[in-house]
Image (tube, rainbow, N blue to C red):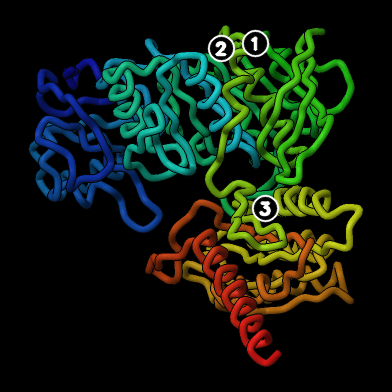
C-alpha cells in the first residue's frame, strides 16, 4: 500500500512542507535501512536529534518536530517534510495508516504487568494454537508466527516495526496476535494505532523506576492499555494485588467490559488453586469460571503460574474461546528461561529463571522452597543486578534472595556501562542487612558463580540462577558477550558429575 503525505499530514494534524502528492509505502526510525519510498521518522534523542541522520537515508520524506525542522533547514533539505509537535504521539497512527491498519483484521491480545507477561503470552499461544488458530507472538523472547521465529528487538517493537509485523502476520494468514506490552511501549506511544481486542494485567511490583520516577507513574503507564485513547475493547485483570484491585475499579468505572481473576477465594470471575504437585513442579489445578469447574495439569511450577494461566484463560474466553479446548492446549507448554529445569541426571533440582525484580525473585525462591519442603533439602541462588537500570531495587533483590536461600552467590548480571563491583556491593549490602548470618558469597565471574552454586548442591537440594533466563548475551560496557545461564548450568553439572564419576573410579581402583 502507499499513502500520500497530504493524507498523513491531515491524520497527524501536522504542517506539510513540500509536495503533498508524494506517496510513501513504509516508515521507520532507522535512517540507513529505509527504502526510497519510505517516510523517515526523525525523533529527538537523549544525545542527538534524529534529523541529523537525514543525509543517511534514501527515504522520500521526513516526519519530524520543530527542532528537527531547524536542522533540516540548515542542511537545505529538499524532500517533503511533515512537522508535528510530538512525533511519538502520531507515529503509531501514521504507521498503521501506511501499513493498511492490519489490526482491524486481527484479534490482538495484549498483556502488561511487571511479572508474568512472557509466561502468559506462551500460555495464550499454546491454547490458541490448540484451538486451531494461526497465532503470532511478540514479546521478550522475540517474535514468532505459528512458533517460527521472526527476527526483532525490544519487548514491544517501535510503532513502524510493530505495524509492519502486524501486516506481515495478516498476509501470512495469522488470525490472533498475542503480545507483551511494556510500560516503556505505552509511555512512548509504540502501540498507538493498534486495536486491542482484549488487554490483560498480571501484577505490579518495583521495577523500571529509572524510567518511571514513582510507582504511581509506573502504574499510570500500565493503565494506558485499559484507559483512554489506547484502551482495549475488553479487559482481564488479576486482582491478587492492590494494584490490580485499583485498576479493576478504574476500568469498571470507565464502562469497559472486565473479567477479574484471582488465586484466592473471593468474588472474582475466575479463581484458580493448586490441588496437587508433581516432583517436577508441575501442578494439578482446579479453576472456577463463573461457577463452572475445570481441572487440568499445568506443567509450570509456582503459585504465580496459576495466576498466569487464569489470566490467559480469562483473555482467551474474552475473545470467544472454549475454556476446555483452550486448557487442553496449555498442558504441555514450555517457556524458555522461566523456571526452566536443567536436568543432566543429577540428584538435585537445578533451575534457570528470568526473575530480575525483588518480587519475582521472592516468588521463584518460595516455589523452590516448596519443592524441598518436608526434606533436608536446601535452597541456593545465584543473583545479580543489571547496570544502567533502576538502582534502588538492587539491595531489595539481595534481601529477597538472602532471606530465602541457604546460599546466596552475588555475581554480575548485565553491568552495561556501570562499575560491576559497585552493583554487586549494593546487592550484597541488602543481602547482609536482611540476613546477617546468611551464607553470602561474592564472585564476579558469572560462570564461576554458577560453578560455586552447583558444587555446593547436595542430594535433595534445589538451586536456581536468576536474572537472565532465556538471554544468550551478557552486556559488558559497549560489548555483548555470549553467555547463556542454561548452557553454563548444564556445563557445571556435567563437570561435577564427571568429577564424581572419576573419584568413584579411583576409589574402586584403590579398593
Nearest to the observer: residue 185 or residue 295 = 295
Q: Is residue 212 left or right of residue 481?
A: right
Image point 57% across, 33% down: which residue? 333
Q: Residues within 10 Å of mark 2 (few under 14, many from 20)?
A: some
Image point 63% across, 89% down: which residue? 509
Q: How many marks?
A: 3
Image point 35% across, 42% down: which residue? 152
Determine contact: label 1, label 2, CB under 8 Å.
yes
Can you name the residue that lies furthest to the right here? 374
- To which residue does mark 2 refer? 233
Q: Is residue 429 left or right of residue 196?
A: right
Secondary element at tag 3: loop
What is the spatial separation of the Cα atoms under label 1 and label 2, in whole angstroms?
Answer: 7 Å
Image point 65% across, 76% down: which residue? 452
Task: Find residue 377 and report its image quarter.
Answer: bottom right
Secondary element at tag 1: loop
Mark found first going from the N terminus, 3 or 2: 2
The spot of residue 456 in percent (x, y) is: 72, 74
Indicate which disc residue 357 carries: 3
Is residue 87 in view from this perspective?
Answer: no
Image position of 165 with respect to 450: above or below: above
Indicate which disc residue 256 carries: 1
Q: Which circle, 3 or 1, is nearer the viewer?
A: 3
Indicate which disc residue 139 carries: none
What is the spatial separation of the Cα atoms under label 3 and label 1, in whole angstroms?
Answer: 31 Å
The spot of residue 275 in percent (x, y) is: 84, 30
Amino acid at each position: 500500500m502507499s499513502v500520500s503525505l497530504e493524507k498523513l499530514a491531515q491524520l497527524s494534524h501536522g504542517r506539510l512542507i513540500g509536495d503533498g502528492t508524494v506517496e510513501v509505502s513504509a516508515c521507520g526510525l532507522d535512517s540507513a535501512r529505509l527504502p526510497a519510498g519510505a517516510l523517515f521518522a526523525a525523533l529527538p534523542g537523549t544525545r542527538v536529534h534524529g534529523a541529523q541522520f537525514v543525509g543517511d537515508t534514501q527515504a522520500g520524506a521526513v516526519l519530524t518536530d520543530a527542532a528537527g525542522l531547524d536542522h533540516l533547514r540548515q542542511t537545505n533539505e529538499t524532500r517533503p517534510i511533515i512537522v508535528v509537535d510530538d512525533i511519538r504521539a502520531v507515529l503509531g497512527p501514521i504507521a498503521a495508516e501506511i501499513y493498511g491498519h492490519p489490526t482491524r483484521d486481527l484479534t490482538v491480545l495484549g498483556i502488561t504487568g511487571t511479572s508474568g507477561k512472557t509466561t502468559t503470552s506462551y500460555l495464550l499461544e499454546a491454547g490458541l494454537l490448540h484451538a486451531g488458530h494461526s497465532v503470532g507472538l511478540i514479546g521478550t523472547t522475540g517474535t514468532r508466527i505459528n512458533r517460527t521465529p521472526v527476527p526483532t528487538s525490544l519487548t514491544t517493537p517501535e510503532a513502524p516495526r510493530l505495524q509492519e509485523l502486524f501486516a506481515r502476520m495478516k498476509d501470512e494468514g495469522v488470525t490472533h496476535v498475542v503480545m507483551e506490552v511494556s510500560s516503556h511501549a505505552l509511555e512512548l506511544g509504540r502501540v498507538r494505532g493498534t486495536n486491542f481486542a482484549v488487554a490483560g494485567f498480571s501484577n505490579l511490583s518495583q521495577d523500571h523506576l529509572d524510567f518511571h520516577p514513582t510507582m504511581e507513574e509506573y502504574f499510570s503507564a500500565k493503565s494506558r492499555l485499559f484507559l483512554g485513547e489506547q484502551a482495549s475493547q475488553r479487559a482481564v485483570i488479576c486482582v491478587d494485588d492492590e494494584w490490580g484491585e485499583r485498576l479493576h475499579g478504574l476500568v469498571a468505572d470507565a464502562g469497559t467490559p472486565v473479567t477479574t481473576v484471582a488465586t484466592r477465594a473471593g468474588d472474582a470471575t475466575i479463581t484458580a488453586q493448586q490441588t496437587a504437585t508433581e516432583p517436577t513442579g508441575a501442578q494439578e489445578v482446579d479453576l472456577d469460571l463463573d461457577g463452572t469447574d475445570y481441572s487440568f495439569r499445568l506443567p509450570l511450577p509456582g503459585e504465580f503460574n496459576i495466576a498466569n494461566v487464569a489470566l490467559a484463560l480469562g483473555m482467551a474466553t474474552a475473545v470467544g474461546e472454549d475454556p476446555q479446548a483452550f486448557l487442553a492446549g496449555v498442558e504441555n507448554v514450555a517457556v524458555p528461561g522461566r523456571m526452566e529445569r536443567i536436568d543432566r541426571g543429577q540428584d538435585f533440582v537445578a533451575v534457570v529463571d528470568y526473575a530480575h525484580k525483588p518480587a519475582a525473585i521472592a516468588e521463584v525462591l518460595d516455589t523452590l522452597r516448596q519443592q524441598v519442603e518436608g526434606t533436608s533439602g536446601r535452597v541456593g541462588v545465584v543473583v545479580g543486578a543489571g547496570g544502567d537500570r533502576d538502582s534502588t531495587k538492587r539491595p531489595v533483590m539481595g534481601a529477597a534472595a538472602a532471606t530465602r536461600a541457604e546460599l546466596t552467590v552475588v555475581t554480575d548480571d548485565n553491568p552495561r556501562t556501570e562499575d560491576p563491583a559497585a552493583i554487586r556491593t549494593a546487592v550484597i549490602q541488602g543481602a547482609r542487612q536482611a540476613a546477617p548470618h546468611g551464607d553470602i558469597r561474592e564472585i564476579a565471574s558469572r560462570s564461576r558463580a554458577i560453578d560455586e552454586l552447583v558444587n555446593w548442591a547436595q542430594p535433595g537440594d534445589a538451586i536456581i540462577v536468576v536474572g537472565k533466563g532465556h538471554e544468550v548475551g551478557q552486556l559488558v560496557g559497549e560489548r555483548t558477550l555470549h553467555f547463556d545461564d542454561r548452557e553454563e548450568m548444564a556445563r557445571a553439572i556435567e563437570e561435577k558429575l564427571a568429577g564424581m564419576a572419576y573419584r568413584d573410579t579411583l576409589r574402586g581402583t584403590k579398593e
